[in-house]
Amino acid sequence: MAETAYERYLSADKMLSFQKKEEDLICDGERDFQGVQQEAEFIWTRINLMLKRTNEKLQASNVWEAVDLLGQAANLWGGLTQKSQELLMRLWPNDFLKIRKMIGEGASTADSPRYHESERLARSLWPLFENRLAKYSLTIPKLLQEEPDDTGHHDMQALLKAMMWYDYRVQEFAIAHLYLVFGVIGDRTAGLKGGTTDFLINRYNSYLFPKLWDSINSLYVDFKPSQ
């Protein structure tokens, strides 16, 4: 069959050549595992471009456009979470044991340069957010205490919520990935990087925007439940 313009544009033959041939799969689940991991790499390139554009929009004071881009990037993380859930459904633990023997030591999602780049790019947004707060003589607690209808800072409130939503989606993926690991290798087995899943738990217990989340506590400093 002749190659179509669609396939040429996507370099489909080259792209699919990186997948194992069906007859070479050690189990059906290997197609799912390899396919999801490869798809994740493509999705991270999309997320990273959106984060770069978000940074540019904030530097140019186009806050609403930055808010929209962050929302789109967050949705992509939601798709990655669903893929982790699919793998938990599809991968039989003993099949993953076979796959794991072929992966090699030290090979894991945490080794992906694009995954790490997404973390770096997201954290680079925080100084820009703080600069805008300073411009309006605002603090996060003050912004949180303002009623949405009684403030002229709708754009900053929307940006704060977008950053919170983006961070939430990343943490959601981390939790889903953690339970995927539990479901295929257990919670006491040494990982591909040598440690147990305690390493993953500690690594994932880290917000991208910790000051944002911590500021919510300030709303409840003087709060006392009614007796």
Image (cartoon, rainbow, N blue to C red):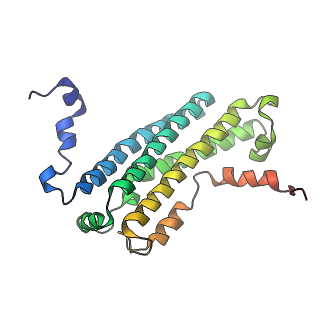
- Across and down, in percent, residue 166 comes to 56, 44
* Number of marks: 0
- In this view of the protein, can residue 19 be seen by the observer? yes
- In this view of the protein, can residue 124 be seen by the observer? no
Left or right of 88, for residue 98: left
- Quadrant in the rendering for residue 43: top left
Q: Residue at x 25, y 68 (%)?
A: 101
Whether residue 140 is situated above or below residue 222 in the rendered picture: above
Front in this rendered view, residue 87 or 62 = 87
Q: Residue at x 75, y 32 (%)?
A: 153
Tell which residue pokes out farthest to the left in this image: 1
Which part of the image, by quadrant, shows the C terminus?
bottom right
- Across and down, in percent, residue 20 comes to 18, 51
Front in this rendered view, residue 142 or 2 = 2
Tell which residue pokes out farthest to the right in this image: 227
Front in this rendered view, residue 121 or 131 = 121
Left or right of 154, for residue 88: left
Front in this rendered view, residue 165 or 52 = 165
- Across and down, in percent, residue 151 comes to 80, 31
Q: Residue at x 53, y 52 (%)?
A: 172
Which part of the image, by quadrant, shows the N terminus?
top left
Q: Residue at x 81, y 42 (%)?
A: 145
- Across and down, in percent, residue 29 comes to 27, 56
Whether residue 66 is situated above or below residue 183 in the rendered picture: above
